[in-house]
Image: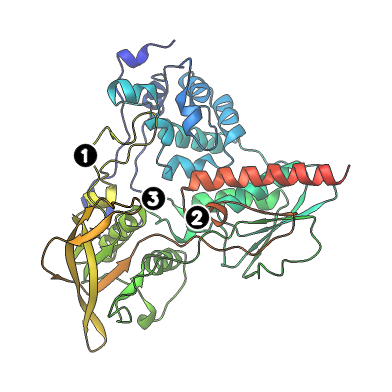
Amino acid sequence: MNNKFLTIHRQEAGYRPIHDRIHDFGEVEQTLNSKDRRTQASRCMDCGVPFCHWACPLGNKPPEWNDALSKGDYETAYRLLNDTNDFPEFTGRICPALCEKACVLNLMSHEPTTNRENEAAITEMAFQENLVHVVQPVRNGRRVAVIGAGPAGLVAANRLNRMGYAVTVFERCENAGGLLRYGIPNFKLNKAIIDRRLHLLYEEGIDFRYGEDIDLTSLPEGYDAYVVSTGTPTARDLPVPGRELRGVHFALDMLSQQNRILAGTDFKKDELVNARDKDVLVIGGGDTGSDCIGTAHRQGCRSVTQIEIMPKPPVGPDDPHNPWPNYPRTFKTTSSHEEGCTRRWNVNTLEFIGKDGRLTGVKVQEIKWKPNPDGGRPIMEPAGKPEVIKCELALLAMGFVKPEMPQFADNVFTAGDAATGASLVVRAMAGGRKAAADIDNYLNATNK
């Protein structure tokens, strides 16, 4: 077993300075130099029972590729990484790193191996050194349609194409990526990273058809099998008085519009969802809400407040209700929170308040949660007097509704959020791999 973890501490690349990064949409995360990155990879213990394998939805093998990275063998490191992860340049930037929370070093000292950053570094070096090659598969004469070009659909398309199927991807938006492109801000994932991978998929023969809003009850004809990977397009709403006021928007109204603006799309002034010179209220305490905070700062807001109806999570690093090697549900401060935000928990939204049709504030009330004597969801009770939070822009970031799917034929397979409801990108990618394998097994069985 490697023992460098005894003398080498965890070193993260960290973020660009706040005073610098809030003025642009460039990626906030920095990188270590190659020597320090290899040193960090050398901390991996090469455990006899590597819980990181178990924790990763893709079944990534950090001990193997960390060992290759520590030796400077980027070609082997990338091959090992790409065997299980089709697009490690995505997860290396935005994954919450379930593997790191399950790392034995996290149990011992709360200094797990920097797997996520190592993953990104391996992939960037692979592209830089021309180690990522175009593959031209031998075609098997069968055709598969993929409906939706988010992370699940892209992975399924990539796997099926490599197996020899002729793959057509139908996407209702103007470009591929799903929430990677239209939900996650550029300061977390530069869209040039997506485009770089798409160019490879184009060269490998995948046919992308954009602006195609497919009716799931009437799938395109002429295909041997289908992958439905349409995500969770319906955001959870907040139907309280005043919801119709101008200034109340879903989080993705702002996030997707800002990403499109950065890509060159023009919007009319009255169409803009912009935080400039406004007090902003973000309703919802998850990652999407955090992305709204960072975007609001870059648009020039006056202030940001984030409220969450659930209690404040325990301050870590350990979660007594979800112990190692499970992912701890603990208090999280993102790079966007660091840029400035008032955060409150146990706050319920009662009403949107406005003047002349425009939002001026939101009436809220502190609440408490009591155990339900019948079991199930706890009971919410008032715990304070109603108050008004002044704001001119309110963003609803309360998650997404799991879509209801029609009854499909046996040759139709669902993947990603369309199958599971809203979840992590890495889980959607794992769903794409499974759908591709299931289709291959199905078509091989039916053609015997």
Q: Is 374 left, or right, of 79 in this rendering?
A: left
Residue at 74% over, 59% down: 409
Q: Residue furthest left?
A: 385
The residue at which mark 3 appears reads as 188
Q: Residue at x 57, y 67 (%)?
A: 174
The x and y percentages for residue 305 are 20, 61
Above or below 446: residue 69? above
Q: What residue do we see at 25% from left, 43% from top? A: 331
Label 2 vs 1, first from the N-terminus: 1
Q: Quote the CA–CA distance across marks 3 and 2.
A: 23 Å
Mark 2 burial class by Cα count in 10 Å: few <14, some 14-19, many 20+: some
Q: CA distance from mark 2 to mark 1?
A: 28 Å
User: Is residue 175 something that shows in the picture?
Assistant: yes
Q: Quadrant of residue 148?
A: bottom right
Numbered disc 1: secondary structure? loop
Coloring scheme used = rainbow
Q: Amino acid at mark 3?
A: Lys
Q: On the image, numbered disc 2 is attached to which residue?
A: 421
Q: Splitting the image into 4 quarters, where does residue 429 fall?
A: top right
Are there few (<14), some (14-19), or many (20+) residues within 10 Å of tag 1?
A: few
Q: The C terminus is located in which quarter?
A: top right
Please, is residue 436 above or below residue 271 in the view? above
Question: Which numbered marker is on residue 315?
Answer: 1
Q: Position of residue 270 (x, y in %)?
A: 36, 83
| Between discs 3 and 2, the one toward the N terminus | 3
| Residue type at tag 2 | Gly
Residue reaching furthest to the bottom: 356
